Amino acid sequence: MEFRSRDDDGGSASDHAVVIVVGNATEMRGSGYWMVEYRAGRPNRFSAQTLGCYLDIAVAFSTVFENPLNRDDATAILFVDRNGGSAEELFDEQLLAAWLNFANGAVGLADPVDTDGDGASDRTFGEALLAAENVRKDPLAARDQLLAHKEILERILLRDDRR
């Protein structure tokens, strides 16, 4: 979107804004659901264009996923060998699933979520993802820190109290 204005003495200004339209989902989905959607072959519920848009939205909002992602990239991130995956890979799997749920409209940045597992909302979705991404981007973050934030992301995805 772009805005231009001109005033009565010949001055002018312009500005632009990025408009992102998300889906209208009402239910959060786990990483396995998204892996099935992105793996090779026909998607179950979404067109290839929609899946591509969801990845673009994830990249636009994430501070971790900074480069464009395609379906092969998404499948590789979402299909982690649970026994052999590094802490970073396990974390990224849940982070991408969280951003895909946002892109699908299942959760908004200001929606309250439970990050400590006590059943009560204590942060917004946006705050929780920012905190998790800050840990992921910290080169000194220990494996247990990454796995703790991976578990927070997974808890957010799997515990959808809005049902």
Image: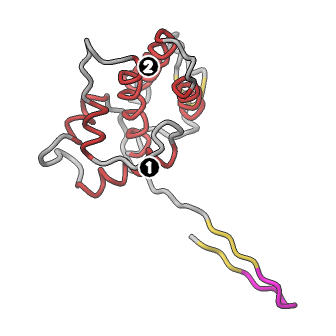
Picture layout, residue 154 above or below residue 13 = above
Q: Percent from the top left, x then y, of residue 31? A: 30, 29
Q: Amino acid at mark 2?
A: Lys
Magenta span of residues: 5-12
Relative to 6, is 9 on the left or the right? right
Closest to the observer, 132 or 76: 76
Quarter residue 11 falls in: bottom right
Relative to 93, is 46 on the left or the right? left
Q: Residue shown at 13%/48% (left/top)?
A: 42
Quarter residue 139 falls in: top right
Q: Amino acid at mark 1?
A: Ile
Q: Quadrant of the C terminus?
A: top left
Q: Residue shown at 56%/70% (left/top)?
A: 1
Crowd tier of the residue under label 1, counting other residues whose Cα lies within 10 Å: few below 14, some 14–19, many 20 or above: many
Q: Percent from the top left, x then y, of residue 6? A: 76, 85
Residues at marks 1 and 2, CA–CA distance in whole angstroms: 20 Å
Is the Cβ of the residue at disc 1 closer than 8 Å to that at disc 2? Answer: no
Closest to the observer, 119 or 53: 53
Element assignment for label 2: helix
Asked if the stretch drawn in magenta spans residue 111, the answer is no
Crowd tier of the residue under label 2, counting other residues whose Cα lies within 10 Å: few below 14, some 14–19, many 20 or above: many
Label 1 sits on residue: 57
Q: Residue furthest right?
A: 9
Tell me which secondary structure the magenta stretch mostly adopts. loop
Label 2 sits on residue: 150
Q: Give the mark, 1 or 2, whose residue is nearer the N terminus.
A: 1
Q: Residue shown at 17%/47% (left/top)?
A: 43
For the rendered model, the colour scheme is: secondary structure
